[in-house]
Image (tube, coloured by chain):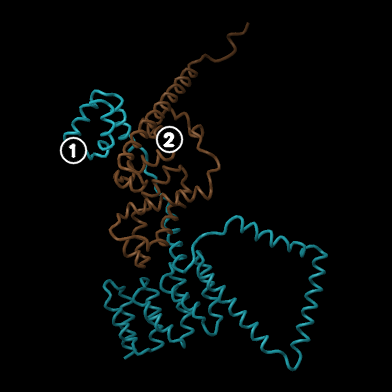
Chain colours: A brown, B cyan
Amino acid sequence: MLQVRDGAGEQLGVLFDRYQAPLFNFYAKLTGDRTLSQDLVQEVFLRILKYRQSYSPGTPFRAWIYQIARNARIDHFRKTPRQVPFDPDMLPPVLPKDSAQAGQESALLHCALMQLPEEKREILLLSRFQELKYEEIARLLGCEVATVKSRIHRAMLQLREAYHQLEQGTAAKRAKTAAADYLPPQGGSHAV
Amino acid sequence: MQCEQIAELLPDYLQESLSGEQRQQVATHLTTCAQCSEEVALWQKLSLLPVEQPGPESRARFEAMLHAYQAGRSEQSPSRFEERKRASFWSSFNWFRSPLGAVAWSVALLAIGGFIGTRFNRPNADTSELASVHRELASMRQLVVLSMLQQQSAGERLQGVSWSRREEQLDPQVLAALLHTLRYDGSVDVRLAALDALGRHGRQPQIHQGIADSLQEQQSPLVQVALIDQLLEWRDPDATQRLQNLRQIPNLNPTVRQRADWAISKLN
């Protein structure tokens, strides 16, 4: 990063190769929008170029890039507010009967995660998928480490609740579908 | 231990950063408490979520952004508002297409033609005005070249390079843009065309310098061979030394090395 800061633009390619996938994964899971995530990743690297002089040696680069990523997202939604708020009903409610168990669980988890408020989803993603330490997350969000831990605990409780509801809903729908499969054909033999 | 106390330790347990004793306490609690153990299981289950991967076009977009930035302009596209404004500006000329409009502007063109004809046929035509029109045209051509060299499509950049050939004397900005293209353009064809365009303006000494400097940085054997030929054609005093330096590069393409040897023998 120091080379990038001192004007070696080509070195940015190395950083891009290292960080574009984790950043994209973070944005895609957070927003559920792949196109927007691609745009935001590009925006992050453009900002690194623009503001590279503000990087001070000794600062953990990972924390710095996530700070930029966070600001890029906030600025984006400030300029273009979401047209349609997230609606859990838009997600596929019933999963295919024959899908593998792991696939089902993963789809349910995805739905449950998307039902969380964005700040809770963000903190879970940062700690679980981006593998940031609680100290790094605290610096990023501008709060105490203890606050980060309690937010993570609360986010997990809510995720568990959402996951349970979805699981029960899916089971009930599947039972209904299965019952419908066993109903006798209508008409014919019941004529008066 | 109660759930409230465990809740304080749980986040650290999840990130595996607890000390041995505390970890043991949490593990013991988890065997007896369904709710807490469910939370841990859910945390572990999150690994089932697939890792989202960016598309292959992401790297190309990044390269384009980097080039655009290095060339001094960001990739930002005009906003919709600006597009609308531009559209409404052009739509105000739609009346030209109507029959009445066609007659009107034919008459106007005839009048302008007549005016120019009488003005320039005079023996003492105003030559300074003509010169200023020439200058404006040249600067417009330069702008076109500069903007085309920054396009994302290699075809358009090639066109930009060929436009630059129309100039008799290269403007410093166009010259810098062409040298940048020669060094960093992603397409070999565009780099070769830039070299050709620069070669035509060999009288400008900074071109010799820029081309000789780019020799060490080129990766494509095609461009390297073309550069060697150009240096041989100009026969600058430091050409032999430059070619010797090129030969020192490890893993140099054998054909390029052969060409450099041949050029050195010709120069001596």
Q: Position of residue A123 (x, y in %)?
A: 37, 41
Label drawn at residue B69: none
Q: Would residue A189 be found to the left or right of residue B251 on screen? A: right
Query: In the image shown, does B69 or A65 lie closer to the viewer?
Result: A65
Where B65 sits versus A169, above or below? below
* Residue that sits furthest to the top in the current view: A192
Q: Position of residue A186 (x, y in %)?
A: 57, 14
Where A37 sits versus A164, above or below? below
Q: Chain of mark 1?
A: B
Q: Position of residue A86 (x, y in %)?
A: 50, 37
Where B29 sits versus A41, above or below? above
Helix, strand or loop at disc 1?
loop
- Are labels 1 and 2 assigned to the same chain? no
Q: Position of residue B224 (x, y in %)?
A: 37, 76
Q: Residue at x 37, y 57 (%)?
A: A16
Residue that carries the numbered disc 2 in the rendered image: A116
Where B184 sits versus A155, above or below? below
The amino acid type of the residue labelled 2 equals: Leu
Q: Total number of numbered labels?
A: 2
Please tell me whether mark 1 or mark 2 is closer to you in this view: 1
Q: Chain of mark 2?
A: A
Q: Would residue B160 be found to the left or right of residue B114 on screen? A: left
Label 1 to label 2, Cα distance in Å?
Answer: 31 Å
Query: In the image shown, does A21 or A157 lie closer to the viewer?
Result: A157
**Quarter location, residue A59:** bottom left
The amino acid type of the residue labelled 1 equals: Ser
Q: Residue at x 38, y 86 (%)?
A: B232
Residue that carries the numbered disc 1 in the rendered image: B19
